[in-house]
Image (spheres, helix red, strand yellow):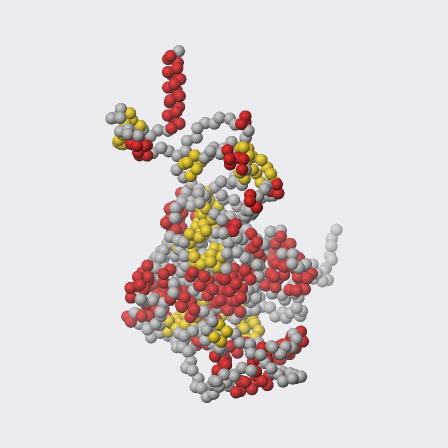
Amino acid sequence: MIRNYVRKTNRQSWDESSKLLAIKSLIAVNLKSPTVGQNRWGKSMIRNYVRKTNRQSWDESSKLLAIKSVIDNKNSYTKASANYNVPHSTLQDRVKKIKDGKLEFDNSDSKDCILNPHTNVNLNFYNVLSVCRYIHQIDAVLLSHPDRFHLGILPYLVGKCGLNCPVYATIPVYQMGQMFMYDLHQSLCNAEDFNLFNLDDVDAAFDKVIQVKYNQIVSLKGKGIGLRIVALASGHMVGGTIWKISKVGEEDIVYAVDFNHRKERHLNGSDLEKLGRPSLLILDCFNAAYAQPRRRSRDEALMTCILTTLRVKGNVLMAVDTAGRVLELIHMLDQLWRNKESGLGVYSLVFLTNVSYNTVEFAKSQIEWMSDKLMKSFEGARNNPFIFKHVKLCHNMNDLKKVSEPKVVLASHGDLENGFSREVFIMWASNPKNSIILTDRAAPGTLARNLIDGGSDRNIKLIVKKRVPLDENELEEYNIKYEKEKMEGSKMDPVSSDSEDEQEVMRGKYDLLVDADTLSSKKSSKKEFSHNMFPYYEDKCKFDQYGEIIKPEDFIKFDVAPVDKPTLDEPNKKSDIEENLYNVPSKCVKYEQNIYVAAKIVYIDFEGRSDGESIKQMVLALKPRRLILVRGNSYSTKVVYNFAKVFIDGKVFTPRIGQCMNVTTESHIYQVRLTDTLLSKINFKKGPNGNLAYMNAKLKLNSRDTVMEVDNVISEKMPRIDDQIFTLEPLADHEIHPHKTVFINRLKLSDFKQILSKKNIPCELSKGVLWCCNRTVCVRRVSIVLYYELKYLLYLLSKHIKQ
């Protein structure tokens, strides 16, 4: 029939393509969240929507802690939802996905036999949570490098997840690793409310570190009895390590990520080629499809870029790490500034991190871990290359502004995602005279990678995060809330006459003068207490082995001239005003800013990693029996996989994210126990490498509860599959059958010659033949089994002839 119906409304008037796109966006919302200011398909859009409620306003770290408390059976869903302010349905959904295995790692660098805890640039909380599920199975931690990509989540695992096991690292990794984590924590706290871990967690993590040296053989304890680890130089960062894990007479494992075979100014090359053929090699494919430029052309490009920028009165920003590869750069630049012919002495060179002074001080004491050239220079002329003459150390943006322009600034972090490098980039990016030098190919999705791929002369949108003081109304609300909490706390704590508050009034009894204003302010601020008798205050003094610990602030004199301001090269001693600024109540703001990138963007490779050709040569030289390829995209992993399949006879594995696999050479290995009866009947024969015996026994399955302990000594628990164990018991005499002779090792003619000489039998060795008795008898090297076969056939032949 004919329908002339006309729709009166627009309800259900969508087209099928729009519906499919909407469904696709809802399905993908849990797989990849869009960035702020973008829609589901990456297109920019304007958002003027103002939230009317506080629903879904929790932070990621609170959600992570809530999920962990539920998985560890510490809290129920309801209690965790109330404690961490996370909706019950969201918490239940996330826990279900984790238990079902739908939430996985984003990269595979931490999936090694002994943990090398790392984090990606965005501190993915689900990666951390996946590690927490296996936290009680970790027996040791090996740290390869000091940067956050190799130990970034270690403070969280120790401080929040309860990781309690020995951590092994070289001395520079221990020292520089702390600098990395301090700088990272401070950079994140300056931009947002970061509470995944704190500085106490960092200290607790590094308190567990056992410091080792290169080529030092360390025997593990506990469950790791029998295992030995050896640290070898990687050549990537100072103290960087290639770990060799071995057991006497069994397989050895080599864990090699981020190594550099080239010799640099402050580091020697890696020692990977000095190793023998390993049973298992764990190798990263990060640079498998990349070819490095020559060192001379790289240095010339850096020098040209700096000179051309400074001569037009522009500034140069170099995005570097905190205390790793920056040592190579800063050592090179200081040498250039010392050269009068370069013409760089009139310009400023700045090293800007939160821990720049401590980083340089540690580098001064680590010369023995660096190149042979630096060691000889230090041993001969006592010339420390890290006593800089032209480098100015800055710790905040105020110090940087005091340095005259034009200047070259080395600021952390290298990916421009946070830290001082991001702040300086926002300040200098719009000036065409400036240059931005990127020294590391950062991970995809970071600002540095975006600049390398897209270049300059374009507009970009950045999410700016910063911490600002509270305004008047917010400050007033904060003070009211603070006073209320203080009053509630004072009501909970009983008043004691021995409290520290009363003792502060009694300070200042020394012979030196104390600031009267300070003392009067302390007295007026204290609450007056009424006493039934004359008050007596007991002196609570702390002493050390030399006497009383005296605080300098207790001896402030009147009319003392202020001390000269410390220079930028001195330690970062903050004044009282600066400390008060940090203690001022503040808040974190976040907004989107459009920036026109007019500055010159230059990428110069100072990563210090081996390229694809070097990785192939290492694989060809080592020829491992098993090879595991990690930390690479699909293309780079495929390049190394195809090469290894052709040129080595071992098996090659490319595990997926979160995949567990068995790569042992002997997969059928079981634990058995020998009974005392069997040991008493064994007749050991002395061999070249130990005692040997032939046993006639049978396997019997016993429960562990029925196995008796010897001399009431309980052996250490070993990892077992179940609660049962096999035992070997001797066979009865009538069950023992004769066996063929077993030949072990090969007879050397030189050893046989010595035996004959001891028996006074004349013999000589000539062209692989042993002649005896004036060349009447000769002995050649043939198969022993073949000799006995020939002898047996000869006996049969002679017997046949006699018959």
Q: Position of residue 790 (x, y in %)?
A: 37, 22
Q: Position of residue 560 (x, y in %)?
A: 44, 86
Q: Is residue 657 left or right of residue 81?
A: left
Residue at the image point whose x is 33% and y is 70% from the top: 337
Q: Is residue 293 visible?
A: yes
Considering depth in this image, is 93 or 43 the residue closer to the camera?
Answer: 93
Give the farthest residue toward the right: 1
Q: Quadrant of the C terminus?
A: top left
Residue at the image point whose x is 49% and y is 62% from the top: 206
Q: Is residue 473 visible?
A: no
Q: Is residue 405 left or right of residue 715?
A: left
Quadrant of the rendered image containing residue 388: bottom left
Q: Is residue 468 left or right of residue 252?
A: right
Q: Position of residue 406 (x, y in %)?
A: 38, 74
Give the farthest residue toward the top: 803
Q: How many marks?
A: 0
Q: Position of residue 625 (x, y in %)?
A: 44, 43
Considering depth in this image, is 578 or 218 the residue closer to the camera?
Answer: 218
State whether residue 706 is above or below residue 363: above
Residue at the image point whose x is 32% and y is 64% from the top: 378
Q: Is residue 140 left or right of residue 61?
A: left
Considering depth in this image, is 726 or 25 the residue closer to the camera?
Answer: 726
